[in-house]
Each structure stands twice: as C-alpha cells, then as structure tokens.
Amino acid sequence: MNNSENRVALVTGATGGIGFEVAKRLGQDGFTVILNGIEDTEGEKKAAELSSLGITSEYVGFDVTDEGAVNQNVKALGEKYGKIDVVVNNAGGLGGRQRFEEMTTEFYRKVMALNLDSTFFVSRAAIPFLKKGEHPTIINYTSNAGWNAGGPGAGIYGTSKAGVHAITRALAKDLAEYNIRVNAVSPGTIDTPFHAKIKSTKPEVFASWKNNIMLGRLGQPEEVANVVSFLASSDASFITAETVQIGGGQALGI
C-alpha cells in the first residue's frame, strides 16, 4: 500500500510527457509534488492542472544543467518543506544526432550535461534533505540506448544514459548507510510528444516501431508512472541499485 501523505516529491522535467504523468501519479498517491522545468508558462499551467485534481503542487523553474541554479533552488525547496522524500530525475533528452567523426565538443558536452550532469547536480543537492525524509529515494532515468549504445547519431546519448545507469548504482552504494534507496527506470519507446515530429511527418515509420517490441505496441506514460510510484513507495523498501526496464521486452530485440 502506498501511503504517502505529507511526503514531498521533486520531479524534474515535469511539464509534459512522462514527467507530468509521474508528477500526477505521485500526487494521486498523496505526495506534495514540486514540478520542475524551464518552460515557466507551461509549468504554471501544469501545476494548476494538478491543483484542480486536488493535488498539492507547485512549479519551480530552473535549468537542471546549471549547477548554481540547482543548488540554490533545491536548497530553498528543502528548507521550505523541511525535507525531500523523493527525487525523480526525469529531465533529459536526445539533444540531437551527430556521429562521432563530426561531433562537436559543444554537442558532446550538451548531451552529457542534459542527461548525466543534471542527475548528479540534483541528487547531490537533495541529499541533505533526503536524509530527513520518510522512505527517501532517488529515481533516475536511463534508456534502452544505455544498453545498446543508441541508434544512428545517438551514440553520445547512449553513452550519457549508460552513465546514468552507473551513477544510480554508485549513489545506491554511497547512500545506503542513510537508508536512501536509489533506483532507475529504463523506458522503451513511449508514445509521448517527444515523438510528435516523426509521428506527423513519417507516420509509417512511427507505426513500424511496434514491430521491434515483444508486446507489439508502444508504451504509455502512465505505465512508466506506475513503476515510479511503486519505487517511491514503502512497498519497494528493499529495492535499491536496480534498473527496471519498461519497454514491453524491447531491450531484448525480436
């Protein structure tokens, strides 16, 4: 049973797609939810949407790749609530596609910052407040690309997500003495606005993606949110240093 009354969850990248569904599900579980993003108008709109559902929430805009902004805002949130119980490092992304031969150092650093630096910055800043939390936990996001090194031009994205897999286990080892659990989810192809462009311009390609998934369909954001909800709950109290694949068997290939 997930009894999360009076618990506080910070969800980065929570203004749309999987992040918002995770925030909504945690709110339905009883968490006070802090939504983070960089699109302030959309963030305020999403927080209002949660409030209309009876969920206690607020939006705090800051760039999770900016170390100073992360430190300042996470500290302020921790001091405001007196603790942080759950951190969901949802923010991240592909960042574009470049093959290694022509890859610029700027692009390399941008993708690593978006996926790996952000996870480190937010987790580090939250640790003092997680120590005060109830069933404290960090939930990171890796990807199938972290296992198979990504598709054409997405090699550095795969590299960054493999780094998230490793830092999840490293954080779990480092924080176990404080009873802070650290796990990750690894979503497969999920039907979100992330794929809106190819869905509209090459619908036949988008439709074919399900052929590489054992269950024969794309995942839904709610299905990722369900797993995050479990990992954030006391039901998962003996689970740490794990990565849960949420891809309908996609990672195995068919």
Image (tube, grey):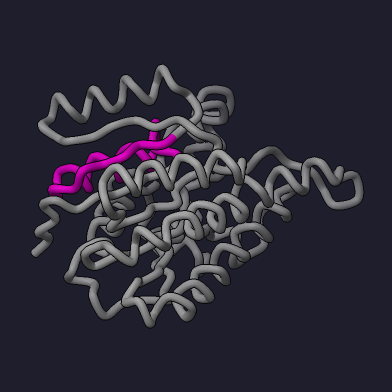
Residue 42 in the magenta stretch? The answer is no
Q: State whether residue 167 is above or below residue 57.
A: below
* For residue 26, side relative to residue 12 (left or right): left
- What percent of the width, then of the height, locates residue 71? 52, 47
128 relative to 20, above or below? below
From the viewer's side, name the closer residue of 209 and 116: 116
Residue closest to the eye, 149 or 6: 6
Magenta stretch: includes residue 24:
yes
With 72 as the anchor, is 84 left or right in this view?
Answer: left
Is residue 95 in sight in this rendering?
yes
Front in this rendered view, residue 154 or 207: 154
Q: Nearer the viewer, residue 239 or 99?
A: 239
| Residue positioned 23% across, 72% down in the render | 236
- Counting every numbered tag in the picture gives 0
Where residue 119 sits: x, y (%)?
A: 53, 55
Residue 204 vs 217, above or below: the answer is above
| Residue 52 x %, y % | 14, 24
Q: Residue at x 40, y 69 (%)?
A: 182
Furthest residue to the right?
Answer: 101
Q: Which residues are magenta?
A: 13-36
Name the residue rendered at 68%, 46% in the picture: 111
Q: Outermost residue toward the top? A: 41
Q: Is residue 173 left or right of residue 65?
A: left
Coordinates of residue 156 in the picture (x, y in percent): 72, 54
Residue shown at the point (37%, 54%) measured from the top left: 87
Which quarter of the rendering shows the N terminus?
bottom left
Q: In screen coordinates, is 29 left or right of 143?
A: left
Is residue 210 visible from the viewing direction of this image?
no
